[in-house]
Image (cartoon, rainbow, N blue to C red):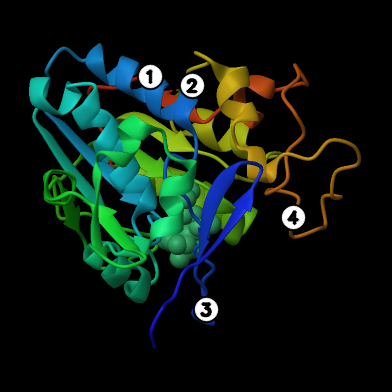
Amino acid sequence: MVLTPLTDSVAGKAMLRVYDGAQKGATAFFRNRPLLETLMELLEQRQGRPLRILFHAGSIGAEVYSFVVYALRTGLADRCPMEIYTTDLNPQFLRFAEEACYPAEVLNSFSEEERNWFERVEDGVVRPVEAVRRRVWFLPACSFVDAVPPEGEVFDVVFILNALTYVTPDQQAECLQNVARYNTDLLVACAFHPDTIRRDLLANGYVPITTRIAEIHNSWTERIRSGELPPPESPDYSWVIPPFSEVPEFEFRFCSIFQRTDSRQPMPTGA
Ligand SMILES: C[S@@+](CC[C@H](N)C(=O)[O-])C[C@H]1O[C@@H](n2cnc3c(N)ncnc32)[C@H](O)[C@@H]1O
């Protein structure tokens, strides 16, 4: 099956949508710029320590390539050795990500500087330049719920963005317990089950990093609705979010960056 991403503009973002009959892979380049900027600042504070970074649910690659562009343009990728990996449940999305050919319309929502990191492949098709592409390693397809890296492998930063909504609250709890076994520092996550996220994070030693929390939350523009929200029984309950406000537990419900408090050690198996 050939995946042809459809592009449409939602709240000022060029969304790429792929669907292969099983998973929905809606994604976008530079989907949340304040989040990318904040991560660059936080990782800069690691003062050149080598970083291993894993993107779960990476879809067709826009998210991981956006991160690499920011790491290159800020110079972080030169100051700090980085190994960057991506995976997804869907092997077809991963193959697409590796090929990295995107409709040229994606460029319309980029700044001029961001556009410089892309090249034309043929009429109507663009891709990130080689300096960006070669930074990314592709892992076999796997689920973030029960992914098990080879014995002893850990990741300083793990991303699970816009994807926990596709599993049940129980699977979210299982996922975070599992991730904490191989994630040593930052967890970057959103579109999770909001009523249980605080419990799941605290149970596994994660606390929120609230730097620019309101700006980052409000930049998930394609998920924000003013007015009435879907009820808890709706499949959209964990997807749709209201504009930022200091509701109870907002530091967890509306946050996208979390840190392991015992950040030097992965959680032991069976904890
Ligand atoms: C809405 S897209 C989000 C893509 C990207 N993370 C982003 O934020 O732009 C959801 C992605 O999650 C993937 N996915 C769904 N369930 C998954 C699971 N259990 N494990 C890994 N990936 C999953 C889908 O294949 C799809 O690529």
Residue 196 x %, y %? 66, 40
In the image, which is nearer the foreground, mark 3 or mark 2? Answer: 3
Task: Name the residue rendered at 84%, 35% in the picture.
Answer: 226
Asked if the residue at label 3 sits under 8 Å from ligand 1, the reply is yes
Say which of 210 and 71 sits in front: 71
Q: Do the residues labelled 4 and 3 touch (CB within 8 Å)?
A: no
Q: Position of residue 266 (x, y in %)?
A: 26, 34
Q: Which residue is drawn at 39% across and 29% down?
A: 36
SS class, disc 3: loop
Of badges 3 and 1, the one in the foreground is 3
Looking at numbered disc 1 in the image, what kind of residue is underneath it?
Thr
Residue placed under numbered mark 2 in the picture:
207
User: What is the CA distance from the residue labelled 3 to the residue labelled 2?
Assistant: 33 Å
Q: Residues within 10 Å of mark 1 (few under 14, many from 20)?
A: some
User: Residues under labels 1 and 2: Cα distance?
Assistant: 7 Å
Residue at the disc numbered 4: 236
